[in-house]
Image (cartoon, rainbow, N blue to C red):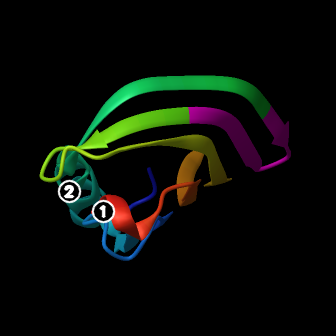
Amino acid sequence: MASDVVWTCHAPSAAPYSGQFSGAAGVQKYFEDLDAIEVTNLDVHSILADSDRVVALGDVAFTVKSTGKASSGPLVHVYAFTDGKISTFDEFEHAQDSIW
């Protein structure tokens, strides 16, 4: 990762890992906050690359630990690289606010 990486998760605002995280400390916080869910299935079925961009398409299923409610649906990860390091990351997931 680049030292000034910008890591963004476009999840429902109620998800603790939703939002923008900057730098190594921010990415660490994202992964700590991601512990709010238990991923029960993750299937990446396509990876597309063009120059300095990589897009991973898949499906995810998870359960919110605090509510016991489950969600499943498509997942998209978009990476941008600068000098061979991740400079930006955007995650798009399908989940409803009601599971939180």
Task: Name the side, left or right, on which 26 lies relative to 79.
Answer: left
Image marks 2 and 1: residues in contact by CB distance under 8 Å: yes
Q: Residue at x 66, y 52 (%)?
A: 78
Which image quarter: residue 74? top right
Is residue 52 toward the left or the right of residue 29 in the image?
Answer: right
Q: What element carries label 1?
A: loop
Instruction: Bin the neighbour count of mark 1 within 10 Å (Cα to Cα): few under 14, some 14-19, many 20 and up.
Output: many
Q: Where is residue 36 in the image (x, y as percent from the top left)?
A: 19, 50
Q: Is residue 14 above or below residue 38?
A: below
Q: Which residue is drawn at 75% across and 30% down?
A: 47
| SS assignment at label 2 | helix
User: What mark, if any, has residue 82 been given in the picture?
Assistant: none
Q: Mark 2 points at which residue?
A: 33
Using the image, determine if residue 80 lies above or below residue 51: below
Q: Residue at label 1? A: 17
x and y percentages locating residue 25 in the rendered image = 21, 63
Front residue (pair 99, 47) = 99
Across and down, in percent, residue 8 comes to 47, 67
Question: Most prominent secondary structure in the magenta stretch?
Answer: strand
Q: What residue span does the magenta drawing correspond to?
A: 48-59
Residue 63 lies, with reference to residue 47, above or below; the image says below
Quarter-wise, where is residue 41 in the image? top left
The answer to whether one can see residue 53 in this image is yes
Q: Measuring 54% from the left and 48% from the top, which residue is drawn there?
A: 85
Q: As rendered, which of 2 and 9 lies closer to the eye?
A: 9
